[in-house]
Image (spheres, grey):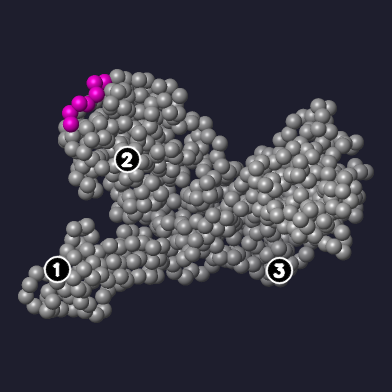
Amino acid sequence: MRAVTSSLAAAIESPDRTVHPTGSIDWDGDGHGGPGSIDDITPKLSRLTVTRALTGQLPQDVLIVEGDQAATASGDLVVGKTDDEQLHAVAYWSRLNPNSPLYGKPRASRDARLDVEFLTAAGFESVPLLRGVSRSLPVSVADRSASLELLDTRDQLRELVNLPAFVADDRTDTFEGPASPGLEAAWVVSFALWRCGLTLSPTPRVGCRLWVPMHGSAMPMISRTGATMLNASTSPTGSVSATGRRKCTFDTDAPFFMASAFEPTDTAAAFTQVAGNLTDTGAAVWDSLGRSSGRIEVWAKVPALPSNADRAVYLDLFAEGSGVPGLTSDNNVEFRIRRDGTSQLKLSGGGATLRTIVGPTYTHDGQWHLFGVHWDDVAGVATFRRDGVSNTVAYTPISSTAPPVSNAVRFDWRIFVPSAELQVTSGLAAADAWQPTTWTAGADVDRPQNRRLVGIFPPDEPQEAWDLLQDVYAAERGLVWIDVDGRPKLWTAARLNTADALTSVRTLTTERQLLALAYRDDRDMIRNIIRCPYTQINLVASAPVWSLNSVVLLGAGQSLTQTIVLDGPIVSVPKVSGWGGPTVAPGPGAWYSISTSPDASLRATLTVNNSTSITLLLENRTPGGLYLTDPTTGDPAVTVSARYLATSRTEPVEVRDQASIDEFNAAPLTVPDNPWIQTQGFALGVAWGLLGLLRREQVVFEELEIPGDPRLEPLDRITIQDKNGLVLSTPLTVQQRTDVFEGGGYTSQLVARPSWDQWVLGGVGVGTPLGTTILCGGPE
């Protein structure tokens, strides 16, 4: 239940309350005007209805509290301009009337607000009802009326999301076996929200050259050796490698959403490495004298023991003096924190260490801290920082000249401890703010219970974030909705197991007698055979995906362009191989091997268009014509190879309750196919959980009309009584709420279902008797 002040709570629950709705629409996009302005629609509202209805992927008859909640509002605008009778409701609101104050103003997608005000001992206090946009404003001449329709802020989740393709390492086909953790539904959720600008961790600062948000886990960031790094850098050309890496898991006690952790190990030798290229735009890290300035910031949790000289945080920035990507360089900046607490910044140039700046020694306590260093080699100052405490160390600036370098920089980040949210910024002034140590996320997110994904198999076309998030949470019967403040909320069904969900938040008095309460108990609600499909994702080994099937002659300066469509999403950098020969093939003369080098005589450029499409550009840079042939056989010899994902058919898992079948006959339910149900074990858990809820008769209580209460939210557990004091014997869980303002009154009409004391989804023990496995105790 939404929290409000004590005075407001007393006013809401008072039988003699004074209440009325207020509304405002920002017609001109210049901010909401105050009372009496053109934006203020409060005096023009008559009947107003705000509906929040739950919908989901299951049939309506068996709908449990899951899915998405869409808020809409409609109202009658029966008043025009009070001091001009010619501007009655229709004329005032009509887009065709040039005398109307709204003539020529946009009607759709204007920022809209609806609130409800209660008179309290301290005066009128307001509670939000809806934050959203105007949907339409139709008028009716026959009724001499106008109406208003509003929609909540779902538009902020309409961004098209192109998911990257991943496959989890060491996948096993049986749910009882071990699995390599690190890729789970939480990564997808964080990634989709980030694409919508609703980040779950601090956003990159202005001038950021490298940002590794991780979205909860470094595992998808590093993927497999040779795979393209996805969104770990501001450069789309970055690549990653994994050397001696450990398995990534999740750590749930980070100061924001989640962060990457690792499986326990007795040695610090094992680490996870992320390497790639920083963007070559923005302020240079190195100037023409080889001097540098910038800042590194990273969240890390260093355990108190063991305390030794092993590295805990290590990041190296390499200048690419020759212009060729690689880890050999002329200049570099190295930042490290050791397990014994010592910190250090090392500046190198020309292959030699020029300055080693020793920072403070920290006491590691196993808690999350924001570590950072800001260096300015011109001033000769390095500022080490942990959380909000800075230590400044002066040193002699580097004066030796070094070869000019480009802005392009190679980075090497080795992760030895739980870490997250790495940022590297260049050209930043020492006085500029550091990353905040507290953070308010852009959305209220529960960590999904789907803790192991086989992989990510993106669709051919990008998907709206709203639909993608619904799919992820529907896989485990969760809830995606927009609250009254316009803030997205993504809740798992495990929230039904929290203390708040198991305690009645309020006893509500219905306007009708309980003996005459409306309800449904259709036989169609019963389901005693549950089938749940799951997606099998396989990694196809690197193999040719296209080969030239005829001998082609490329004249001097000519090129060949070929678009290649794969059967599944690409998960590694594609490669091209082949030969070009003399004008007479086969025959004497030089042969040229295809190369991706910029100065190659026969240059190949591969461009990944989307998850399933590659374009090959082959250019002849020799002064004469070249046949694309094999030098020994004369056959066509151009091949493009890649690794990609494929799906294979699986039979849905099936669970049944024979006692229910004997009593009610067979009543099957096939769960809609969902790409985020990917293992047999998780599918069994979903099926057992649904069977436990649907195998017996159900009751849905409707038309529960109560005095309006804007505090009620989905999943709230309530107790219902009538005016005679009769109390419904079972607690209810709110599924739908409709607020109605009419004739000066305010009522809420509820749809609710009996609450369960435990929400069951299954788990490793899904083969045990029904109801013995509870999935988590609540959101993390």
Q: CA distance from mark 1 to mark 3?
A: 84 Å
**Precedes in sequence: disc 1 or disc 3:** 1
**Left or right: 119, with 164 as reference point:** right
Disc 3 on helix, strand or loop?
Answer: helix
Label 3 vs label 2, nearer the camera: 2
The residue that disc 1 covers is: 623
Query: Which amino acid does the dot numbered 3 rest on?
Result: Asp
The image shows residue 646 at horizontal and vertical percentages of 41, 66
Q: Please state the extent of the stretch shown in magenta in the rendering.
A: 395-401
Magenta segment: does it hold 518? no
The residue that disc 3 covers is: 662
Magenta stretch, main secondary structure, is loop
Label 2 vs label 1, nearer the camera: 1
Residue 380, image quadrant: top left
The residue that disc 2 covers is: 413
- Residues 363 and 777: in front is 363
